[in-house]
Amino acid sequence: MIVCAIQQPYAYNAADAAAAVDFVVRELDSCDDSLDLIMTPEYSNAPSSFPPGGSLEFVKNHTAALEDAAIRAAVRCQAIVALSYCAETPYGWRNTTRVFDRSGKAVGDYYKQQLTEREPAARQVDSSYTRRFRAPEIVEVDGLRLGFVTCYDAYFNEYIEFLGHRQPDIVLTASHQRAEPCGNLRLLNQMLAYYTGAFVVRASVGMGEDSPVGGSSMIVNPAGEILADAVQRNGKLIYDIGDPHWKYFRSDSFGGKMISNRYFVEKGRTPWSYRPCGPCVKLNDKAMPYPRVCAHRGFNSVAPENSLPAFGAAIALGAEEIEFDLWETRDGVPVSIHDADLARVSNGSGFVREKTLAELQELDFGSVYAPEFAGLKVVTLEDILRTFPRQAVMNIHIKNIQDEYFSRPFVKKIADMLEEYDCEEHAYFMARPEVFAACDEVAPHICRCMGAGPFRAEKKIIEDALQWNCSKIQLFKPYFDADMIKRAHDLGLKCNFFYSDDPAEAVELVRMNIDTILTNDYYRVAQAVKSCAAVR
């Protein structure tokens, strides 16, 4: 099979972008029927940096000719053509690699999964699809399984492993990388081929003859061997890869039989020890949209509060957030209990802080709720993180006795556990100023929510939030009004509300622009909020 990667000259000035697009059109028009697969670089119809608002306008004026050239090449050459460009879709403009079969028919689209932070705004492209689960795209054509990696995608090993699991024959890698050293680009694409067990056909933009960065359109085989490298030479990079279904086989450890490299890796995989990922992972606190409903102490109208069943019920029903309370045991373990005293929530007595974890584990935390939960044990922070890593945003209420000096080691222990279970971006601390004083010293990177309540002047909550570097406040009824919400939003603070178990009240709170509603009755309130969120 003869493959061709077109390297396009990068337009350092936007005024030269049209000529760069014309270059690709000419290259497509000069392809002949010796080629079986043709690939263009990412953003082939926008190969430059544009002033704000200029990228999409340019794209609209330079797409039709490029699409027509791709279709002509597919038909004339009887080749598969992969055109990577900013394409109009039913959902808006997206960073797209579109595959045309030998008849010129579009047979599949890949939308870039990992967009750079600035890309949606700078390129005016839709990114909404990236915030929900999608298995890596495979387009099947002429007996080939085509996989895709676009530019920034190449850095994400978790994604590449999943792509390899889908067993592509060829990975089409469209790129607009302009800052990465050529040596690093070679390494990235060698490892991409090696770990997916596929040929890699990479098309990129040339940065100039002597540039040490960018360029590097290349062909790599499944063993990780570079078969051809354009370096900074623009135009067609052509190579006969032979059988596109060829796989790299290696010995099954020293002296073992020959097996595929993918199988060698797969049979030793221990995914339970890796970063949580896949469809169970929710958006992190920064990315998750508002309004949200937070299951206060879990879905505690169907299971005991601050218990794994309560958290699990809420998460299974789609809770964006769960809230839980943490006290420190006498031996320094964070446990999820609301009250300082044990009497209401267990068959024990005394204060949480006076007990060791072993002593708490002797108590029954279920029977006081219902006989069906008899024998339920106390829950530690580690239990929660191990069971539900990154499956919801965690509103962590760190409990303390008012005005006391708060334990720095305890806060550090909580922060260290969040880091260990990769939940730092899925959590925030809700607490009082004396706790945040400890956070300043040992956990300044964890997001914060300033707590409220009748114990202090509510009008001061916004000032306290700003003083202690909080990004949220948690309002406490009835100590708030619409002016407080507006003022907080004007200062960049999100507004939690504690609490509402009334669906009608929850709808009114959303209309008042409350961002997150805490509730004990998760399902009914969540359904009400969902019904009105679209018109907020």
Image: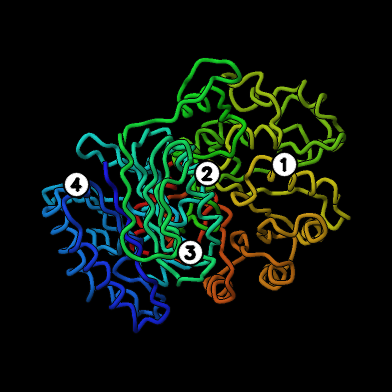
Q: What residue type is labelled 4?
A: Val
Residue depth check, mark 2 versus mark 1: number of the one nearer the observer: 2
Viewer-nearest residue: 428 or 148: 148
* Residue at (74, 64) in percent of width and height: 456
- Cα distance between the residues tagged 4 and 2: 27 Å
Label 4–label 2 contact, CB within 8 A: no
Q: In this rendering, does residue 529 appear at all?
A: no
Residue depth check, mark 4 versus mark 3: number of the one nearer the observer: 3
Residue 230 lies, with reference to residue 368, above or below; the image says below
x and y percent of residue 411 in the render? 79, 49
What residue does disc 3 label? Answer: 214
Q: Which quarter of the picture shows residue 197?
A: top left
Left or right: residue 466 versus residue 240 is right
What residue does disc 1 label? Answer: 417
Residue depth check, mark 3 versus mark 1: number of the one nearer the observer: 3
Viewer-nearest residue: 128 or 42: 42
Q: What residue type is labelled 2?
A: Asn
What residue does disc 2 label? Answer: 157
- Other residues around mark 2 within 10 Å, as few (<14) / some (14–19) / many (≥20): few
Label of residue 314 in the image = none
Left or right: residue 402 versus residue 106 is right
Choose the circle earlier in sequence order: 2 or 3: 2
